[in-house]
Amino acid sequence: MSTTSLDDISKEEDTVFESEDGKGARVVIDEPSLELLSGSKIDYTMELIGSQFKVTGIPGATSSCGCGSSFDIQA
């Protein structure tokens, strides 16, 4: 995951998710990633070592790291 300017978002290639009240973060996902992440959950966590977005419950993942920042998909 990375941060980007709203000017860099492609309306044809990207999907934007935001909270219903408009007060949360916007999450932008490109089409290939959206297919891989469909059915998963994105949480924002705050811990002593910092804060981060964490992706959990990825349906096609065969393994993932303990910190939740990377995962493997069976080819």
Image (spheres, rainbow, N blue to C red):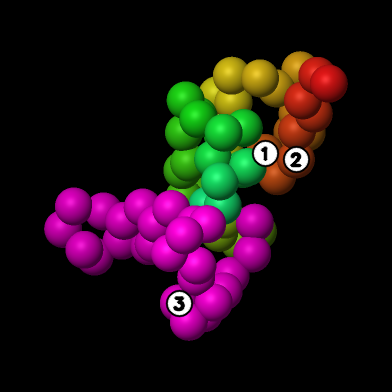
Tell me the residue that label 3 is attached to: 6
Most extreme residue toward the left is: 21
| Whole-percent x, y for residue 9 in the image | 50, 70
Q: Nearer the viewer, mark 3 or mark 1?
A: 3
Of 20 and 45, which appears nearest the observer? 20
**Image disc number at residue 70:** 2
Q: Which type of secondary structure does the marked residue at label 1 adopt?
A: loop
Hey, which residue is sitting farthest front in the picture? 12
Residue under numbered circle 1: 68
- Magenta region's main secondary structure? loop
Q: Is residue 53 left or right of residue 17?
A: right
Residue 29 x, y percent position in the rendering: 52, 52
Instruction: Give the residue at x 31% y 61%.
Output: 24
Mark 3 or 2, closer to the camera? 3
Q: Nearer the viewer, residue 33 or 18?
A: 33
Q: Image height check: is 37 above or below 2?
A: above
Q: Amino acid at mark 3?
A: Leu
Residue 38 belongs to magenta span = no
**Which span is picked out in magenta?**
1-26
